[in-house]
Image (cartoon, rainbow, N blue to C red):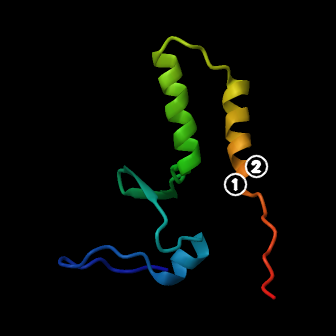
Amino acid sequence: MTITLKERSQLVVPPSIQRQAGIKSGDRLQFQVSPRTITITASEPTYKPTKSEWAVIRRGEAAIARGESVSLTEFLNGLDNRRRKAGTKTSRKVSR
């Protein structure tokens, strides 16, 4: 597909090209520029820790600040224990 760029218009990627490239609303894009060429690539999404992961991270940082060492195994076990407890099912109460 070829378009003509006019003086007062912005460069727009047509929807058909976006579909072919798999670009969706909300995707983060990275632009690389060289003479007469623009390369658009999808950038990797940044990871956001969950609340329970933040809590474990804070505990680990506090332990390090106190001079205690925390091994990677202990850290990962702390994450696993929190996740397992959150999924505990309770019995249903039946009214009579």
Residue visible at 81% across and 69% down? 91
Residue depicted at 52% across the width and 58% down the height = 42
Whole-number angstrom distance, CA of label 1 to CA of label 2: 5 Å
- Look at 52% across and 75% down and name the residue there: 18
State how many labels appear. 2
- Please give the residue where the numbered disc 2 appears in the rendered image: 84
Depth check: give the residue in front, 93 or 46: 93
Quick one: label 1, few (<14), some, or many (20+) residues within 10 Å? Answer: few
Q: Taking 4 as reference, is 48 above or below it? A: above
66 sits to left or right of 5: right
Whether label 1 touches label 2, CB < 8 Å: yes
Disc number for residue 29: none
Amino acid carrying label 1: it is Ala
What residue does disc 1 label? 86
Residue 51 in percent (x, y) is at 53, 50
Label 2: few (<14), some or many (≥20) within 10 Å?
Answer: few
- Judge by depth and name the residue closer to the eye, 28 or 82: 82
Whether residue 47 is visible to the viewer of this picture, yes or no, is: no
Residue type at mark 2: give it: Arg
